[in-house]
Image (cartoon, rainbow, N blue to C red):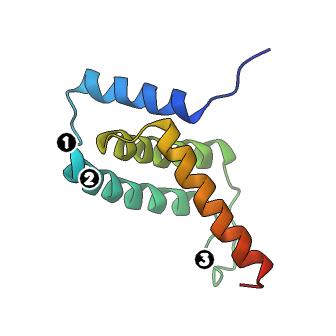
Amino acid sequence: MEQPITIAMILKKQADLQSDMGFPMGYGDEAVKNCCLSIVSEVGEVLQEINWKPWRKKKVKVNNWRVLRELNDILQFWANAVTAMGYSHDDVKKALEEKWEINSRRAKAGY
């Protein structure tokens, strides 16, 4: 049975890739800035692949594989930013759990 991809695996693979490439995104907050700008660009590419314009009458056939590839680009830039700041998969897990708890409370409160 194939193992699922974990956050730890994603972070490690991206850190290795950045190292192999000579850290083109930079380090620390400079890398986070570059990654965030890249993510914004990738979000635009996702939107180009889907029917997001509510005023558009003609809908085009969405290529789900291309959408997924663009979403993966976002994930990779996110992982680059996380590793550039020195966060571990345990840090990500803790931050996600805290945010899920906050959002769960909001949902229960009718937010």
Residue contact at pointers 3 and 2, CB within 8 angstroms: no
78 horizontally vs 21: left or right? right
- Residue 46 x, y percent position in the rendering: 53, 57
Q: Name the mark on residue 26.
A: 1
Of marks 1 and 3, the one in the foreground: 1
Tell me if residue 36 comes above or below residue 4 in the rendering.
Answer: below
Q: Name the mark on residue 55.
A: none
Name which residue lies at 52% across and 30% down.
Answer: 8
Q: Name the mark on residue 34.
A: 2
Q: Name the mark on residue 53.
A: 3
Q: Say which element carries label 1.
A: loop
Query: How far apart are labels 2 and 1 at the CA level?
Result: 8 Å
- Going by the numbered disc 2, the residue's amino acid type is Asn
Q: Residue furthest top?
A: 1
Q: Say which element carries label 2.
A: helix
Which residue is at the front of the view, 108 or 77?
108
Image quarter hosting the C terminus: bottom right
Residue contact at pointers 2 and 1, CB within 8 angstroms: yes
- Residue 98 x, y percent position in the rendering: 59, 59
Label 2 or label 1, whichever comes before in sequence order:
1
Label 1 or label 3, whichever comes before in sequence order:
1
Name which residue lies at 20% across and 27% down.
Answer: 22
- Going by the numbered disc 3, the residue's amino acid type is Lys
Can you tell which quarter of the image residue 52 is in?
A: bottom right
Callout 1 crowding tier (Cα within 10 Å): few <14, some 14–19, many ≥20: some
Which residue is at the front of the view, 40 or 7?
7
Name which residue lies at 38% across and 58% down.
Answer: 41
